[in-house]
Image (spheres, rainbow, N blue to C red):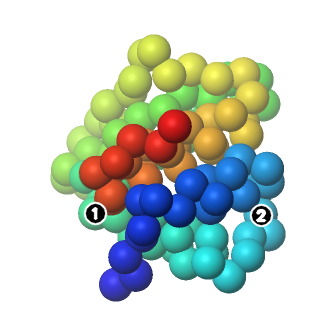
């Protein structure tokens, strides 16, 4: 499995510039790696008010269980929510919090 170098802050900056892609080859590897996290560790974006509000949540451990919402992580901008999920997953995989 692809190992993310936590010192590669240039990849975080690239993601921030265009969270929806397309991504360069190295960032593509990082994004794909972050998408392969175990389900119970995965933070996701949930649309809580159609086209207006997005809230972050953690996937449940078992299928059918309820999502665990982060009440303090509510966004009115989808790209901002995407950037936050990227950073949370980055930290979960690398153990290093991006700045």
Question: Looking at the picture, how far across and down is residue 79, in whole percent?
Answer: 73, 40
Mark 2 to mark 1 CA distance (whole Å) = 23 Å
In this orientation, which residue lies closer to the viewer: 80 or 47? 80
Q: Write down the residue under mark 1.
A: 38
Residue 82 sits in quarter: top right
Dot 1 alpha-carbon crowd within 10 angstroms: few under 14, some 14 to 19, many 20 or more:
few
Q: Is residue 41 left or right of residue 89?
A: left
Confirm or deny contact between disc 2 and disc 1 (CB under 8 A). Answer: no
Dot 2 alpha-carbon crowd within 10 angstroms: few under 14, some 14 to 19, many 20 or more:
few
In this orientation, which residue lies closer to the viewer: 51 or 4? 4
Residue at 62% over, 29% down:
54
Q: Tell me if residue 81 comes above or below residue 15 in the rendering.
A: above
Q: Tell me if residue 64 comes above or below residue 48 in the rendering.
A: below
Q: Is residue 38 left or right of residue 2?
A: left
- In front: mark 2 or mark 1? 2
Q: Write down the residue under mark 2.
A: 21
Question: Looking at the picture, how far across and down is residue 1, in whole percent?
Answer: 34, 84
């Amino acid at each position: 499995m692809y190992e993310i170098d936590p010192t590669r802050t240039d990849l975080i900056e690239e993601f921030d510039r265009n969270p929806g892609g397309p991504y360069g080859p190295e960032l593509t590897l990082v994004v794909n790696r972050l998408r392969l996290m175990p389900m119970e560790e995965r933070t996701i974006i949930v649309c809580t008010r159609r086209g207006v509000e997005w809230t972050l949540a953690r996937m449940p451990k078992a299928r059918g269980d309820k999502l665990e919402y982060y009440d303090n992580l509510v966004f009115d901008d989808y790209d901002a929510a995407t950037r936050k999920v990227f950073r949370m997953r980055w930290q979960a995989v690398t153990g290093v919090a991006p700045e």
